Image: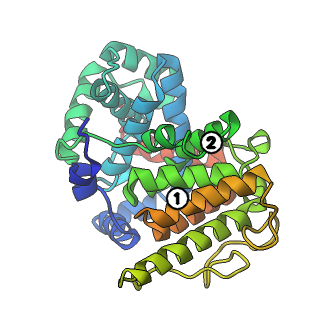
Amino acid sequence: MAANFWESTQRRYWQFTKKELAAMRQKLEDEDPNLVQMYPLPQLRHINIYLNQQFNRLAKRLGVRQQALATAQVYLKRFYTRVEIRRTNPYLLVATALYLACKMEECPQHIRLIVQEARGLWPETFHGQDTSKLGECEFFLISEMSSQLIVHQPYRTLTQLQGEFNLTPEESQAAWQAINDHYMTDLPLLYPPHIIGLTAILLAITCYNRQNAPGGASAAGASGGLVMAANALAHAQAQSQARAAAMGGNSGPGTPNLTPQGSFAGGSFSSQGGREFGEGSNPSDPKVAKMQRFTKWLAESNVDIEGMIDCTQEIISFYDCHEQYEDLAVRDNIKRFIKARGLDK
């Protein structure tokens, strides 16, 4: 893997703004509006949840490690910025992306085993596929990604900094789960991996009660610590702005402001529940002390705090969305266009 993310193809070609991403997807749909109208699909987040589940099911059968699984999910996200999903068999793409990712992450799986396990998982939608079809799909996948296959992941940030912030094993596991879950959002296409890793650490310290979590973290547990997370970012932002002002700079016109209650001005953070960070906090509380250390570290670094704010909102919003997810509805809609268009043969 290339050591420097800042010079990588991931940063140069596969990081977008939300507007750019929306425009790319809209362009794909506009190319064939009749196809879109004929086969309506659930919201993208629900499709992402479903595809993530299929990746996990296949990876579990094959014993694939997490790094390769994460890379495969990024490949599929990149591919679907170039190709409309209704033109493909997503099950074939899931198997192909995992096959390719395993080769790139140096834990290769035999193509026949991939096909065999995929047929066992998805007998109705994969029965017509064979090794030659998967090989063709691999070429298609590589071509659409312009052979840019190196992916930098947030796990490295977590492993490097968990000692720095004295994370407990439970907090490290919660942060790891938050990183796993972010692959069900657009964040891998929007922000650098270190921003996502730091956001996962922040949320692990403040927001997560993993025992009650549907996907590793509960929305209720997250909102309970949300005020502390928001205030931590507000303090870090204020300190960073003060340092920049002292050095004759500024934090940029696009940096959002946070209210003292922990809500974004015009944003979506809830200010109810949880404990505020700062005035009134008990400095002897280990969690408060940990957050103070984390905030000080952020303020003294050049980390994009605005990006962390947006990542936090996106992940919390995703957990709210997860509660409305219906597996059967997504599966039936995908199966419908696969069967109708003969994509299973």
Q: Are marks 1 and 2 in contact (CB under 8 Å)?
A: no
User: Which residue is pictured at 38% across the width and 19% down the height?
Assistant: 114
Q: Residues within 10 Å of mark 2 (few under 14, many from 20)?
A: few
Task: Tell me residue 19's x, y (percent).
Answer: 37, 73
Which residue does the numbered mark 2 point to in the structure image?
166
Q: Is residue 242 above or below residue 220?
A: below
Query: Does the image show residue 139?
Result: yes
Query: Does the image show residue 322?
Result: no
**Relative depth, front residue between 77 and 302:** 302
**Relative depth, front residue between 240 and 173:** 240
Residue 136 shown left or right of residue 312 in the figure: left
Residue 281 shown left or right of residue 201 in the figure: right
Name the element at disc 1: helix
Cα–Cα span, label 1 and label 2: 13 Å
Disc on the earlier residue, 1 or 2: 2
Q: Is residue 241 above or below residue 70?
A: below
Q: Amino acid at mark 1?
A: Trp
Which residue does the numbered mark 1 point to in the structure image?
297
